[in-house]
Amino acid sequence: MAETRAAVITGFNQPLEIRSVQIPELEPTAMLAKVEAATLCGTDVHRWHGRVATAEMLPFIPGHETCGIIAEMNGERRDLLGEPLKPGDRVLWSYPTCGHCYWCTVAKQTSHCPEIRVWGGSRADQFPFLLGGLADYQYVPPGCDVIKVPAAVSPASAAAAACAYRTVMHGFERLGAIAPHETVVVQGSGPLGLFASVVARDRGAYRVLVIGAPANRLQVARELGADDVLSLDEVKDSADRVKWVQDRSGGRGADIVIQCATHMAVPEGIAMVRKGGRYLSVGVGGDAAISPTDFWRSVTIIPVTMAEPRHWLQAVRFLESRGAAVPFDSMISRSYKLEQATEAMNAMANFEVVKPVIYPNGG
C-alpha cells in the first residue's frame, strides 16, 4: 500500500504532525497531483484553531490552495477549456459539485451546491485521504474542473489563485464595471484585499485606497499600486477612518468600498460609501448590523462567497497577462518546507506574513 508524507492536524491548536498517509486507488477519471506549492489563508488558521472545524474532522490535512503537477491519471480527462490533460501538466482544480441540484442546473451558482466538497478539512484516515495541500501529493477527484497553469505564473501565485484570487474575481464579476472617475476603498490588506486593490486599478478606478494592518502588508499595498493607505494600528477611531475616506473623495464618500477583512468591518465600510454607491463584501461570514439609513442612502450591498470554476481560470489568466507590470509574488512573503507547517501556520495567525507558501517537494 503506497503512502506519502503529509502535515496533519490531529488536535486543535496543537503542532501539526508529519505522518504517512495512504495514497488512494484512483477512481475513474481521478488524478493524483504532485504538490508543487501550497499557500495558506485565514480559513486554514481558523480550522487549526477549531473555529470552523469540529472534532469529527480530525485528523485532517489542511490547505485548500494548491498548485500541482499531474503525476497519475485513471483514464482520459480534459481541462475547463476542453483541452486534454496529461501527466506533467501544471494545474489547479475547482471544488466538485453534484451537477444536478437547483444551484448547479437552474441558478448556475455552483458555489451554493449543498453537496460541494472543499479541500483542507477532510479526514486523512478515510478515503480518499489526500484532500489537503500540505502533503507531497493531493488527490484530484472526478467532478471537479481542472485549470492549466501558464508557465509564466509562479507556482506560489498559482496556488493563491485557487482561493483568494478566484474569490476576488467572482466579486468583481458581481460588482460590475468601475468607471474611470470612481474612487475605490479596500478594507483589509491581506491577500484578498491586496489582490482586490490590483484588480480595482486594472478595471480603471480613478483612485485606490487601502485600509489595513500591519505595516508590512500596507507596504506591499503601495508596491502593488495603491494611491494611499491607512493604518488601523495608527488610526484607532472608526469616525476618523470614515473622515479619511471622505477627505479623499470630495467629501462624498467612496464610490465603491470592498470589504476583504472581517464581517465586523461591514458597518464602518458602508459608512464610507457615498449615497448611491456600492459595497462589495468578499469571502467572509458573520453577523453585521446594517442601519435602515443605509437603504435610504441607496447603497447597493453585494456579498460574494467562494467562486465558480471560471473564476479559477480568470485568476490565473490575470496573473499571466498582468505579471510583467505587477509584482504579484510580493504577496508571497515567506516559504517553508513541509516539516515547517506549524511555523507557517503561526506566522499566518500572527500576521507576520501576507501569504506563506509551503513547498512539500522542494521549491
Image (cartoon, helix red, strand yellow):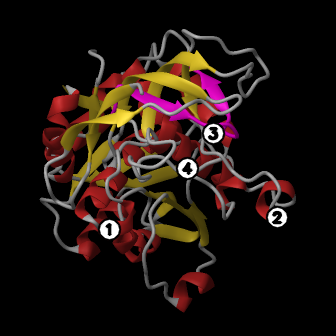
- The residue that disc 3 covers is 311
Q: CA distance from mark 1 to mark 4?
A: 47 Å
Query: What secondary structure is marked by label 3?
Result: helix
Query: What secondary structure is marked by label 2?
Result: helix
Q: Earlier in the sequence, mark 1 or mark 4?
A: 1
Q: Nearer the viewer, residue 122 or 113?
A: 122
Look at 29% across and 23% down and name the residue there. 359
Q: CA distance from mark 3 to mark 4?
A: 24 Å
Q: Earlier in the sequence, mark 3 or mark 4?
A: 4
Left or right: residue 308 compared with residue 58: right
Q: Closer to the camera: disc 1 or disc 4? A: 1
Q: What's the magenta region?
A: 135-149
Quarter of the image where the N terminus is located: top left
Image x and y of residue 96, in percent: 65, 45
Q: Earlier in the sequence, mark 2 or mark 3?
A: 2
Q: Closer to the camera: disc 4 or disc 2? A: 2
Q: Nearer the viewer, residue 75 or 266?
A: 75
Q: Residues within 10 Å of mark 3 (few under 14, many from 20)?
A: many
The quarter of the picture where residue 338 lies is: top left
- The residue that disc 1 covers is 55
Residue 134 seen by the camera = no
Query: What secondary structure is marked by label 1?
Result: helix
Amino acid found under the numbered disc labelled 2: Tyr
- The residue that disc 4 covers is 182
Look at 29% across and 24% down and name the residue there. 360
Look at 60% across and 45% down and name the residue there. 95
The quarter of the picture where residue 105 lies is: bottom right
Image x and y of residue 288, in percent: 43, 80
Residue at the front extreme, as displayed: 1
